[in-house]
Image (cartoon, helix red, strand yellow):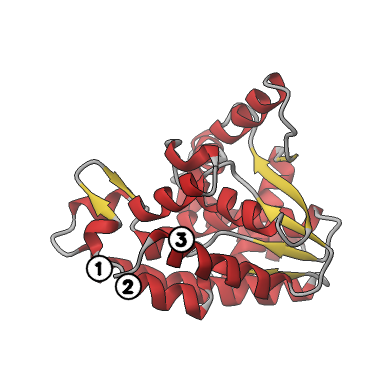
Amino acid sequence: MTDITDLIDALRAAVEECIGQEPEVAVAYSGGLDSSIINSLATEVASTSRYTCAVRESPDDRLVREMVNEQRIPPTVIVLSEPRLIAHVREAAYALNTTNPVQIAYSIPILAVLSSAKEWLILAGSAADELFGGYAKYMKEEDPTIQMGIDLEKALEEIEKLTEMASSKGKTIRFPFASRQVIDLASDIPLKRKIDGDGRKIILRQAAKQLGIEAHDRPKKAAQYSSGIMKEMERLARRDGLDIKSWVEDKVSSDHRTS
């Protein structure tokens, strides 16, 4: 049976493989469990800079300000103004070949880090939710492993597209949770060690606690919500008299009209 040390060892090996000999690396950081684990392990082998993309007054923005108030070193914050958000909506739509608002909102924090980080190598925590049962919807499934598998395939497809987008910007982005050794190990972990009636990503939280990471028990929404991006997209859509999908389609098509 996989124990917590096995999981930590697999994640550590994946992070080290992603970084290689690079002395400096950026981490797409939300303050949540997944990005905190990636950052913690990356600091063992490289100098890391954390970047948080957020709308003002979002949960992630407030978390960063709490860190400042507690005199902890905060990440670099990429604040999304309306023009910048719309630009990233279009960029995400082209990169992922979709106008699905949730997919777009989820990818925007990563795209913003790709555009802003001074480092050429970026690490992100994508695929952890799909592997370890991080989404609330899994709690309602009779057999969550089926939906987790479907979602993982979608996540890996998005990762491939984001990797291509990074390359077009002269950057490299890597995803330790999506490494083969972590995927294989996660597939061997019983569902009850990922999800139970009291919580999600159980074994991953246990690993984070063993690593001394404060975020191990911090409640956290998915990136598109904690960053405030989805809420802001919905607000702008209401202002323009549109539902959110129509608003995304309008922004993408208007870019075609003006280009």
The type of residue carrying mark 2 is Gly
Categorize mark 3 by other alpha carbons within 10 Å: few (<14), some (14-19), many (20+): many
Judge left or right: residue 144 versus residue 188.
left
Q: Secondary structure at mark 1?
A: helix
Residue 133 higher or lower than 210, as above or below: below
Q: Looking at the picture, which amino acid does disc 3 mark?
A: Ala
Residue 233, given in percent of the width and then of the height, sits at 54, 42
Most foreground residue, 9 or 62: 9
Residue 140 left/right relative to 76: left
Q: Is residue 2 above or below residue 26?
A: below
Q: Residue at x 32, y 49 (%)?
A: 200
Task: Identify the mark nearer the N-term, 1 or 3.
Answer: 3
Q: Position of residue 190 (x, y in %)?
A: 25, 66
| 37 relative to 3, above or below | above
Label 1 – label 3 distance at C-alpha: 14 Å
Residue of label 2: 149
Callout 1 crowding tier (Cα within 10 Å): few <14, some 14–19, many ≥20: some
Quick check: marks 1 and 2 in contact, CB under 8 Å?
yes
The image quadrant where one finds the C terminus is bottom right
Residue 145 numbered tag: 1
- The residue depicted at 51 percent of the width and 70 percent of the height is 10
* Picture quarter with the N terminus: bottom left
Residue type beneath disc 1: Thr
Residue 153 visible within the image: no
* Mark closer to the chain start, 2 or 3: 3
Q: Nearer the viewer, residue 5 or 72?
A: 5
Q: Quadrant of residue 193?
A: bottom left
29 sits left or right of 75 in the view: left
- Is 66 in front, or is 150? 66
Label 2 to label 3: alpha-carbon separation = 12 Å
Where is mark 3, residue-wise?
128
Residue at mark 1 to residue at mark 2: CA–CA distance: 6 Å
